[in-house]
Amino acid sequence: MRRLAIVAVALGLACTGGTVLAQEHEGGQKKAGVEKEETFADRHELSLKWVNFLLLAGLLGYFIGKNAGPFFAARSAGIRKDMDDSLRQRQEAEAKAADVDRRLANLEKDIAALRGQSEIEAKAETERLQQQTEAEIAKIQAHAEQEIASAGKAARMALKRYSAELAMALAEQKVRARMTPDTEDALVQGFVRNLK
């Protein structure tokens, strides 16, 4: 491609240079006021310009034809490859977006399921703690009732002992009050008789 550009510039300069010289020559003659008829040299110069133009056009056509086909084919292949890559990337991006959307939808379901599960677990834990508390309260009540019963038994026993002691003391007082020396003698004699 670079060679083609160099050749085109060189041919363009050659054509332009010859054209400029011819125009200066004609311009100089017109300024002098000399008008002459078209001569063989003018026609020869014109035919050289046409040959030069045709040669330049042919060379440009040859180089363009030689290099343009592969250049445009490579360019088309590159564009096609870029389009295929962009289509593939777009499909991958859409798949990732769909996957993210699916995960988000599942995430909301998972969060709802976790909330439900945590509520169930919280209720179960509350019920378990309530049952455990009730069991502890029942144990404490049973222990308290046993202690009350034991204390009541001990109090009743102490009361019975105290009442027996009081009854004995009262009976002793009554017996002493009734006890006379004659009664004592009669009791001792009855006891001795029983021993015999």
Image (cartoon, rainbow, N blue to C red):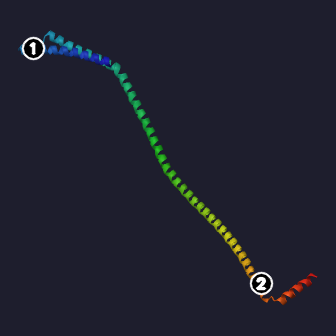
Residue at 34% from the left image edge and 20% from the top image edge: 67
Mark 2: secondary structure: helix
Residue appearing at x 76%, y 85% in the figure: 173
* Circle nearer the N terminus (1, 2): 1
Mark 1: few/some/many CA within 10 Å (<14, 14-19, 20+): few
**Residue 154 lies in what quarter of the image?**
bottom right
What amino acid does circle 1 point to?
Gly
Pick the residue in front: 34 or 5: 5
- Residue of label 1: 28
Amino acid tagged 2: Glu
Q: Camera-side residue: 147 or 68? A: 147
Please say if 128 is above or below 104: below
> In the rendering, which numbered label is found on residue 172?
2
Residue occupying the far top of the picture: 40
Rendered location of residue 52, percent (x, y): 23, 14
Q: On the rendered image, what quadrant is the C terminus found in?
A: bottom right
Label 1 secondary element: helix
